[in-house]
Image (tube, helix red, strand yellow):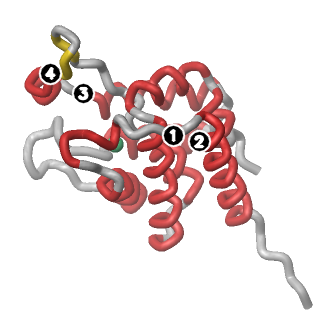
Amino acid sequence: MRNVTLIQIFDHPIAQKYLQRSGIAHAVSVAFHAYRLSVKEGVDPDLAVKAALLHDIGHYEWYTDGEWDFEQYKKNDIHAIKGAERAHKLLVRLGEDRQAAKEIALAILLHTDSYLPDGSLSQNPLQKVVKLADEMDEEPDGKHHYRRISEQTARKKIQELDQLIEQRKRPLKRTV
Ligand SMILES: [Fe+2]
């Protein structure tokens, strides 16, 4: 049994607010990529998918006169740090296991090295899965943040992921 499900996270007002900002469609696709990669790499899918769903919730809106200010963003962005902290707070509030909350937060913190000095990042397998899943869904000029998905489809997909993870966690039944 998991302490916290994806749909519980998704339905929380804090997740809603920040997922809408960075794009629900992107978050959901990255979550699916992370599920597949975690199964392939032998990483806990529950941790990988939660980190993937929440990986971009630390974004700030860098608008100047109604236009996205890419220079400001590049210079000042710390979304991985902010996202790790937000996700950790949200997960603990929902009753997540503390060790799991820490691992998920660290995977979010290290899903990008864009804010770190060159070559200073070494990642564990969970962190690699989340980074790769994000890269698999990236589009030029940050277009992946603006793709749309209906609320209903998003919830359906997230519930599907919850089921896939539950099935993986359940011990295999003996048939003989
Ligand atoms: Fe992303």
User: Could you tell whether 50 is left or right of 132 in the image?
Assistant: right
Distance, label 1 to label 4, CA atoms, is 25 Å
In this figure, which residue is indicated by the disc labeled 2? 154
- Seen from the viewer's position, the closer of residues 102 and 167 is 167
**Which x, y percent locates residue 17?**
50, 20
Q: Kindly identify which numbered label has been placed on residue 149.
A: 1
Distance, label 3 to label 2, CA atoms, is 27 Å
Q: Are marks 1 and 2 in contact (CB under 8 Å)?
A: yes
Residue at 67 percent across and 39 percent down: it is 7
In this figure, which residue is indicated by the disc labeled 4? 69
Residue at 52 percent across and 60 percent down: it is 35
Q: Kindly identify which numbered label has been placed on residue 78.
A: 3
Discs 4/3, front: 4
Count neighbours of disc 4 (C-alpha within 10 A) and say few if under 14, some if 14 to 19, many if 20 or more: few
Residue at 14 percent across and 21 percent down: it is 69
Q: Which one is earlier in the sequence, the residue at label 1 or at label 4? A: 4
Distance, label 2 to label 4, CA atoms, is 29 Å
**Residue 34, placed above or below residue 156:** below
**Which x, y percent locates residue 111?**
32, 46
User: Could you tell whether 69 is left or right of 166 in the image?
Assistant: left
Element type at mark 4: loop
Quadrant in which residue 174 is drawn: bottom right
The answer to whether the residue bearing label 3 lies less than 8 angstroms from the nearest atom of ligand 1 is no
The disc labelled 4 sits on which kind of residue?
Asp
Element type at mark 2: helix
- Seen from the viewer's position, the closer of residues 48 and 119 is 48
The disc labelled 2 sits on which kind of residue?
Ala
Count neighbours of disc 2 (C-alpha within 10 A) and say few if under 14, some if 14 to 19, many if 20 or more: some
